[in-house]
Image: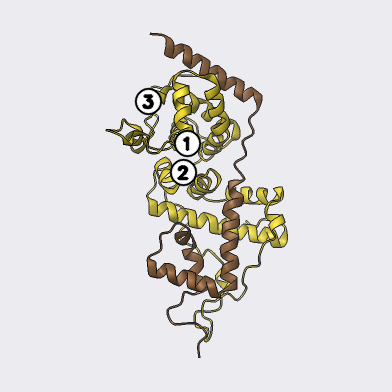
Chain colours: A yellow, B brown
Amino acid sequence: MVGLSQPLLGPELERASATASSGSARERLDGGDALLLDALRRGDESAFSRLVDLHHASMVRVARLYVATVAAAEEVAQEAWLGVLQGLERFEGRCTLKAWIFAIVANCAKRRGVSDKRTVPMSSLAEDDAGGASVEPDRFLEDSHARWPGHWSQPPEAWGADRLVSRETLEAIASAMETLPPMQRAVMTMRDVEGLGSEETCQVLGLSEANQRVLLHRARSKVRKALESYMHEGEVSP
Amino acid sequence: MSGAIANELTCKELVELITDYFEDRLPTDENRRFELHVCTCTGCRVYLAQMRALVRAAGRLAEKDLPAAVRENLLRTFRDWKRGAAEP
């Protein structure tokens, strides 16, 4: 494994993790993360092991947003761990530990992309598919309808709770997410799979809050649409 | 005669506002129109429930399986780092 000479974080996260002037340094750290960090800085191996349990699988998923294969994502995650260890001293907890780690993963993945043609291009918001209705317009009555303009003509049907928790349904969601444009997939992964907040998602992906929200909306709407097809026909629509 | 109340959101509009609603980004009056509509519209209540269910289900995709070989490899990285950090 090679040492990392370049800075691993974008300017925004560097600022967020830079030394706080006073008091606020630990504002984003929950108690568990603070204890874990203290133990890590003391070189406690079981603390590192715990951190690996908490974050490694997520780091591979985040890396997978940028590189084309699981094997490449695994390599990026391993490289990022070294970056995490080397950056420990400088981390001041002005974003959550998870967001800080994800930012390191994203930067490792992007840097790898410079030399690796397999990297998935992260398109800007403008390049992502523009607009498109969240629900097919023919599911609604015409805007000129005398009585119920814009009301459902084919309303959605409730999904059974038992099917929602099935492994097949989760796989349908995962494969629908795979077909999303890269930025939409990245935002939905951060928010809904990894459970990051909107502010942290913006920091890691370098997005404005408004753009992040638009991308999340498009992503969730499309995946809902695909899941609806799956629930009714047993297959995910393209 | 129209069945729709003047100024009421349509279902077609509501499905485009749902993320702003979840994110608490709707202006107060828009938020009120949204909730008023949901109260009276079964289709939109189902749509809202589906979106919530989707977000919950997506959270379950975060499985945490970790092969022993990967852990071993990372622990080696940690020990190397610790040795390096201890050196002057």
Callout 3: few (<14), some (14-19), or many (20+) C-alpha neighbours within 10 Å? few
Q: In whole angstroms, how far apart are the C-alphas of marks 2 and 1?
A: 21 Å
**Of residues B59 and A37, the one drawn nearer to the viewer in this rendering:** A37
Output the chain of dot 3.
A
Q: In whole angstroms, how far apart are the C-alphas of marks 3 and 1?
A: 21 Å
Instruction: Tell me what residue is drawn at x 63 percent, y 30 percent.
Output: B66
Output the chain of dot 2.
A
- The residue beneath circle 2 is A122
* Quarter of the figure with residue A104: top left
Q: Position of residue A146 (x, y in %)?
A: 52, 87
Pointers 3 and 1 in contact (CB under 8 A)?
no
**In the image, is B63 to the left or to the right of A129?**
right
Could one spot residue A113 in this view of the protein?
Answer: no
Q: Secondary structure at mark 3?
A: loop
Output the chain of dot 1.
A
Which mark is on residue A57? none
- The residue beneath circle 1 is A98
Q: Position of residue B37 (x, y in %)?
A: 50, 73
**Of residues A19 and A38, the one drawn nearer to the viewer in this rendering:** A38
- The residue beneath circle 3 is A6
Tags 2 and 1 both on a single chain: yes
Mark before the other along the chain sequence, 2 or 1:
1
